[in-house]
Image (cartoon, rainbow, N blue to C red):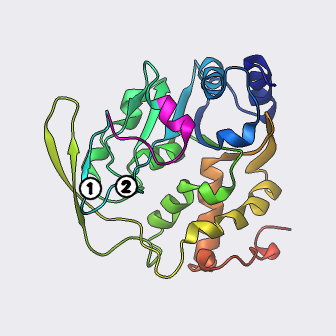
Amino acid sequence: MYTKQDLINHIAAIGIKPEDTLMIHSSMKAIGEVEGGADTVLDAFIEYMKPGLLIFPTHTWAQINDEYSVFNPLTEPSCVGILTNLFLKRPGVVRSWHPTHSVAAIGKDAASFVAGEELLDTPCPRNGCYGKLYDRNAKILFLGCSLRSNTFLHAVEEWNNIPNRISDKYQYLKIVTPDGRIIDRPMYRHYHPGIDVSYNYGKMEEPFIYTGIAKAGYIGDARSVLCDARGMADLTTKFLKLNPDLFSDDSPVPEEWYKK
C-alpha cells in the first residue's frame, strides 16, 4: 500500500517540478492501493505542487446536450473520473465556465488561468485554457491512462483547422454563474464523422518519447507518461502538415518523420 510520501517521491522521480504548471489526466484505479485512497493522491499532488499551478480537466461533454443544456460550474459533476470530482470540492480550487470542456485549478495564477472560458465557442480554442498550457510551457501527466485521453491533441487539431473536427452548427447552451446570472453560450462541439479520432492519439506516444517530449514512469502502480505541452503541439502540428488525416486511423507514425 502506497503512502502520501511514496507518491510524492514518485511524482518527483518522473520529472515534475513543484513550480511547474501541470495538468493531470487520471485513472485512480491504475494507481493501486493507497493509504487514504483517492484523497491521499490529491493531497500528494497539491502539497508537492504548492509553488506551481495544478490543473485537472473537469469536462462535462458527456452529459451536456440539447436537452440538458445548462451548465453550473458549482454543481455539475465532471465526466472524467473520481480524482477530478474530488478535486472540484477542495478548498481553493477554481473552475472555468466552459460548458463542455471546463478545467479546475489550484495554485499560482489559478483564477486568471481559468478566467474567460465563457466567452469562447469551441471546445479547445487557442485563446482558452488549453492554449494557455502551451503559453505557460506546461506539462501534462497521463496518470495511469493512455494518450487516448489527450484532450490537448484535440486542441492542436482545432488550432490547425483540421476538417471534420468541429461541428458546423452551434448547440445552444447556457451557463449559470456563481452569482446566479444566466449566460447564453452557443457552442460548437467536437465532431468526428464515423470515428472518434481520440482512439488514435495513442500513436503519438512513441514519437513523443523518442524525441524527448515525453517520459514514462510509475506513480504507484500506474504506468504514467509526462509530456511537454509545447513540444507535443509543435511536433503534432508538423505531422498534421504532412498528413491532415493523421488520426483517421491507428497506423503508426512513419519513423522517418521523427527518427534521424
Above or below residue 1? Residue 143 is below
**Looking at the figure, which quarter contains the N terminus?**
top right
Q: CA distance from mark 1 to mark 2?
A: 7 Å
Q: Amino acid at mark 1?
A: Tyr
Q: Residues within 10 Å of mark 2 (few under 14, many from 20)?
A: some
N-term-proximal mark, 1 vs 2: 2
**Which residue is depicted at the point 58% across and 80% down?**
245
From the top left corner, tell me how far across and down residue 26 is, in percent.
62, 43
Above or below residue 243? Residue 120 is above
From the top left corner, tell me how far across and down residue 41 is, in percent.
65, 27
Magenta highlight on residue 231 = no
Q: How many marks?
A: 2
Q: Which residues are magenta?
A: 75-87
Residue labelled with disc 1: 68
Q: Is residue 185 left or right of residue 80?
A: left
Q: Nearer the viewer, residue 128 or 223?
A: 223
Q: Quarter of the image holding residue 72?
A: top left
Q: Secondary structure at mark 1?
A: loop
Magenta highlight on residue 82 = yes
Q: Quarter of the image holding residue 166?
A: bottom left
Asked whether the beta carbons under mark 1 and mark 2 sit within 8 Å of each other, the answer is yes
From the top left corner, tell me how far across and down residue 75 is, in percent.
32, 35
Residue labelled with disc 2: 63
Q: Amino acid at mark 2?
A: Gln
**Which residue is depicted at the point 23% across and 30% down?**
178
**Which residue is depicted at the point 54% across and 72% down?**
196
Above or below residue 206? Residue 191 is below
Q: Is residue 221 left or right of residue 93?
A: right
Q: Is residue 53 left or right of residue 33?
A: left
Query: Of the numbered discs in the image, which one, if any, rests on residue 159?
Result: none
Q: Secondary structure at mark 2?
A: loop
